[in-house]
Amino acid sequence: MTRAPRILVFDSGLGGLTVFRALAAQRPDADYVYAADDLGFPYGSKPEDEVKSLVLSALERLIADHAPDGVVIACNTASTLVLPLLRARWPKIPFVGTVPAIKPAAEGSRSRLISVLATPGTVARDYTRDLIEKFAHDREVTLVGSKTLAGLAEAFMQGESVADEAIAREIAPCFVEKDGRRTDAIVLACTHYPLLLDFFARLAPWPVHWIDPAPAIARRADHVLSERFPTHSVRDAAFAFVFTSGAPPAPRLLKTIEVLREKIARERQIKALA
Ligand code: DGL
């Protein structure tokens, strides 16, 4: 007898909701636990060893508490560092990571000028340099590590107001002009950034393709899980939201969570009728 999978979606904060949204659309039959390591946030400015131990200790607890069938690390800063460690520690659990979408950006760019907007940690990783070497060695790649954008996205999701200037300043270095060419593709290499996409699009000095890897990650997670867990008949499935600190979500975030919950319920209904 088959059953629906229980999927743990993990991030340092609320950025992973951008991956969760896509995942829930792809697999509305699954049970979900979304976990934000607010105790460890932000990962992006911390030394690698500290990020490794934060992720390992948070997952130690979350996996023991929720016994997931699969884990999606919805965080570039963590994925570019800890995936091999996690797979070694929990060899029976499939882990799907989120890493900078450099390949589609390089393929889609006509000007051959692309930028990668990420946390300072992701920008500094060997993993990111290797992706560039592999998929974009014949492109000009500008790496932009922002110290503040993930925090601004958190504030925005918690209902605080965020100044346009603060965002415009952070994205400005992504826009490069050279020999009559302009950057035309920007990789959103931190899962928090798609939460600010409306700001980015409005404040950009010229239009570009903003590359959000969430749908591709959702397809990958579905692919990895579907052999053991083929899409199940739709029924009332669970969605739990946890902060590692145990704090309750702020009102605006609660609203976002409710909207996501309703969206999953609607997609479940549509699938059930199909
Ligand atoms: N959401 C995380 C990422 O994708 C980073 C946020 C943080 O600095 O903790 O990289």
Image (spheres, rainbow, N blue to C red):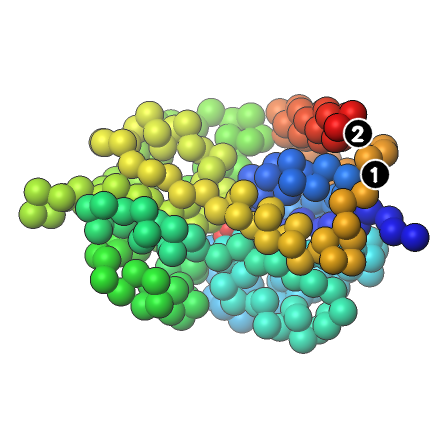
Which residue occupies the foreground of this view, 55 or 229? 229
Label 1–label 2 contact, CB within 8 A: yes
- Residue 145 position within the rendered picture, expressed as x and y whole percent measured from the top left: 35, 53
Looking at the rendered image, the quarter that the C terminus falls into is top right
- Residue 132 position within the rendered picture, expressed as x and y whole percent measured from the top left: 33, 63
Does the closest atom of ligand 1 sit within 8 Å of the Cβ of label 2? no
Residue beneath the point at 43% across and 59% down? 122
Q: Which residue is mark 2?
A: 272
Q: Is residue 79 left or right of residue 244?
A: left
Q: CA distance from mark 1 to mark 2?
A: 7 Å
Q: Is residue 208 visible?
A: yes
Q: Is residue 83 left or right of residue 246?
A: left
Q: Residue furthest bottom?
A: 88
Q: Which residue is mark 1?
A: 233
Q: Is residue 42 visible?
A: no
Is residue 80 depicted above or below 267 in this figure? Answer: below
Report the disc number at residue 257. none
Is residue 251 depicted above or below 167 in this figure? Answer: above
Residue beneath the point at 41% across and 27% down? 198
Q: Secondary structure at mark 1?
A: loop
Which one is earlier in the sequence, the residue at label 1 or at label 2? 1
Which residue occupies the foreground of this view, 27 or 119? 27
Q: Secondary structure at mark 2?
A: helix
- Residue 60 position within the rendered picture, expressed as x and y whole percent measured from the top left: 75, 64
Q: Residue furthest front?
A: 274
Identify the amino acid type marked 1: Ser
Residue beneath the point at 65% across and 54% down? 223
Residue beneath the point at 33% across and 38% down? 209
- Residue 49 position within the rendered picture, expressed as x and y whole percent measured from the top left: 54, 71
Which residue occupies the foreground of this view, 129 or 230? 230
